Image (tube, rainbow, N blue to C red):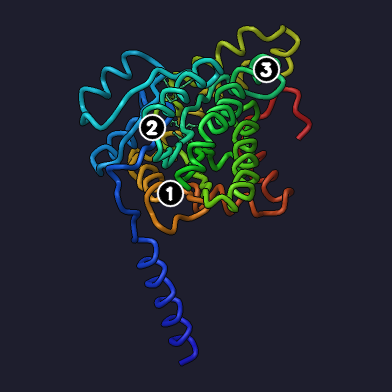
Amino acid sequence: MLFLSILGLVAVWYLYRWYKESERVSDKGNKYVYITGCDSGFGNTLAKYLDKLGFRVIAGCYTENGEIALKKVSSERLTTVSLDVTKSDSVKKVADFIKTHVGEKGLWAVVNNAGVATPSGPTDWLTIDDYKSMLAVNLMGVIDVTLSVLPLIKKARGRVVNVASVFGRISPFGGPYCVSKYGVESFNDSLRLNMAPFGVKVLCIEPGFFKTSVTDTVMLQNHLRKLWDRLSQDMKDDYGQAFLETTLQELDQRFQQFRDGDLMKVVHCMEHAIAAVYPRSRYSPGWDAKFLWLPMSYMPTWIADRFFLQYSPKPKISVL
Ligand SMILES: NC(=O)c1ccc[n+]([C@@H]2O[C@H](COP(=O)([O-])OP(=O)(O)OC[C@H]3O[C@@H](n4cnc5c(N)ncnc54)[C@H](OP(=O)(O)O)[C@@H]3O)[C@@H](O)[C@H]2O)c1
């Protein structure tokens, strides 16, 4: 009896949550949404989806081809702009355009989506410039773009949607990717508190592995080989050729295992963050995010470390 009552209460709570979360904002045709990194992947899919839903999309594209391709499949409501988030001039130019484009309405949402996944590899294979180049896109780009349009978002009492990653919650491999995404999480959390008094909502998307260019195994393997080639002979001797071969092989196997081809799982979360009357603070699309990476992030450090070390290739001179 007690068990049934608890089950009933849980069911009622889920029903209430589902009902509350299904409500969407009105007047989409007058709401402007600025998305970065719309050439491919989540950004491209989101731009087309929001356009179909009736929002006024301002799609930041890194390449001219990206702009042309997106325009071809969108309505006249969607505007493309050329954007390199690592260049403040480019970010400012787009912000100035948006200011004149949206007028008194302000900007309803910015989606900080642009990102890169290379160079990635063991930390001691990398240089400070490798770190700087990725942080310039994944972290400084997010901050620069946000600050450039924040006054317009405050005017609309709108939203900032930051695309982080489960690797902003746990760090199972070396290199700047996790560093950059932890930074996005931190920026997101402090901004959420700072903007609350202005009626601006700040939402974070933390996807697991999805099939896009950032998880392209051939591209990642080629980058890893390039990093290996530039190592000193001493470093190569410490790691051993077998380390490289196993890492390349496992990279392929693990990514095949985890990569989800359904990008709409992420795009639906982004749409909810932008359009729901009551959005969630965090979204974790992907089964691997929900059942592996996030639970692992709550484990004591020694358990998580033992798990990751057990499944990682070891350097030739490893003491483990
Ligand atoms: N796929 C996943 O499994 C996964 C998981 C967690 C988080 N994420 C995050 O999701 C976001 C979107 O990635 P995605 O998976 O959709 O990969 P994607 O298809 O490579 O999308 C990234 C986009 O960012 C653009 N971009 C790269 N450098 C830029 C720059 N300097 N300025 C402006 N735009 C730039 C890329 O343009 P080009 O295509 O022209 O290079 C591309 O359109 C990223 O922040 C990524 O870290 C992805």
Seen in the image, is 237 located left or right of residue 182? right
- Work out whether mark 3 precedes mark 2 in sequence or the reverse, and give the earlier one: 2
Q: Which mark is residue 74?
A: none
Element type at mark 2? helix
The residue that label 2 is drawn on is 43
Element type at mark 3? loop
Dot 1, crowdedness within 10 Å: few (<14), some or many (≥20)?
many
Q: Disc 1 or disc 3, which is closer to the eye?
A: 1
The spot of residue 170 in percent (x, y) is: 62, 43
As drawn, 164 above or below 37: below
Asked if disc 2 is less than 8 Å from ligand 1, the answer is yes
Q: Disc 3 or disc 2, which is closer to the eye?
A: 2
As drawn, 280 above or below 274: below
Element type at mark 1? helix
Question: Real-space Cα distance between discs 1 and 2?
Answer: 14 Å
- Work out whether mark 1 precedes mark 3 in sequence or the reverse, and give the earlier one: 3
Dot 2, crowdedness within 10 Å: few (<14), some or many (≥20)?
many
Residue found at x 60% / y 21%? 136
Seen in the image, is 246 located left or right of residue 64? right
Give 123 or 245, whichever is nearer the viewer.
Answer: 123
Question: Real-space Cα distance between discs 1 and 3?
Answer: 35 Å
Residue found at x 52% / y 48%? 200
Amino acid under label 2?
Answer: Gly
